Image (cartoon, rainbow, N blue to C red):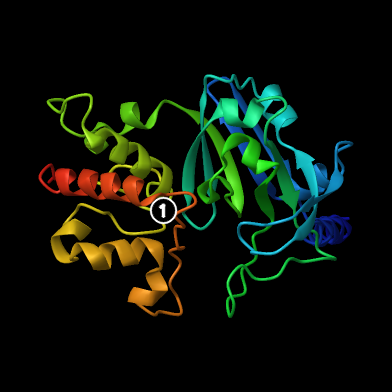
Amino acid sequence: MRNILKTAVLAGLIACSTLTFAEPVLTIVNEQYKQSLDKQTLLNSTSLREIDIPSDVSYHKPMRYKAIPLQPLLKQAGIDPADILKVVATDGFAVSLPAHLLLAEGKAEPFLAIETDDAPWPAVKPGKPASAGPLYLVWLNPEKSSITPEMWPYQVARIDRVPPIETRFPQLLPSAKLPASSPIHHGFAMFKQHCLPCHTLNKGGDASLGPDLNVPYNPTEYFREPYLRMMVRNPQKLRHWDKAVMPAVDEKFLSESDLTDLLEYLRHMSKRKVK
């Protein structure tokens, strides 16, 4: 009898070891709600459809995706237009988006594109294996809401409702003594939009993809301005490196005037370092 029981237990363990469990690819969180979804659940959604993106931000060409609209998932999570959402990717990219952009009716439409096993997407960068999958936040009609490239995060893993950046990371704030008309305030807004999704500053921020831009040194302290502008506009022109991940920032999304104000913010913060 004992041998029979041992055999039965061993058979059960072997059977269990062959089972596979779907791992979550997306987690949506607020203070009272948490939902983790695996890829097959998303693919089984009744709202799944094929969408065409005429000019994909990551692939720089037209793309067709299987995708589900993001709005229903956010509404189910209790997200309101006044909320701030932090979208986190597996590579360390993290962008804060105002929820009203994602929930607006008649404007740009956000979708979660889903990479399938039978039709894998190409690599995002030549010579590198990683694609934009398994989940990629893409937009239909992005021009209706002035959606910028930073608002197309790929390898999305988590969406959190969070307090504003200024509340969570006060070390990013310029001096309170600055007049309201100072261009440094606008530069801070540009920094939040274009730099903070990849970098921290004064050890503040959600991202971990790029280095801190103030500690121990601020780029305005070791780059002359023409080269710093080149670094923003075309990083590979300044430093050719096959493993570089910093994208070029086009004047369409960051004007020369915007860039001037952003650099003024960085110079200002070079005198406000944290220890």
Side of 217 where 261 appears, left or right: right
> Residue at the location (14% across, 45% down)?
273
Relative to 241, residue 83 above or below: above
* In this view, 26 is above or below 20: above
Q: Residue 202 at what x, y percent from top left? A: 22, 45
| Left or right placement of residue 142 versus residue 183 in this view | right
- Quadrant position of the N terminus in the picture: bottom right
Q: Is 241 positioned to the left or the right of 46 in the image?
A: left
Would residue 274 be seen by someone viewing this image from the given angle?
Answer: no
Determine the secondary structure under disc 1: loop
> In front: 200, or 40?
200
Q: Nearer the viewer, residue 159 or 213?
A: 213
Residue 260 position within the rendered picture, expressed as x and y whole percent measured from the top left: 27, 49
Whether residue 123 is visible to the viewer of this picture, yes or no, is yes
Q: To which quarter of the image does residue 155 belong?
A: bottom right
The reply, left or right, for residue 23 in relation to residue 92 is right
Q: Residue at x 60, y 54 (%)?
A: 154
| Residue, disc 1 | 198
Query: Can you give x and y, in whole percent of width and height, for residue 198 in the image?
Result: 41, 53
The kind of residue on which mark 1 rests is: Cys
Instruction: Depth check: give the residue in front, 142 or 133.
Output: 142
Percent position (x, y) of residue 232?
36, 61
Residue at screen point 18% across, 65% down:
224
105 vs 171: above or below:
above
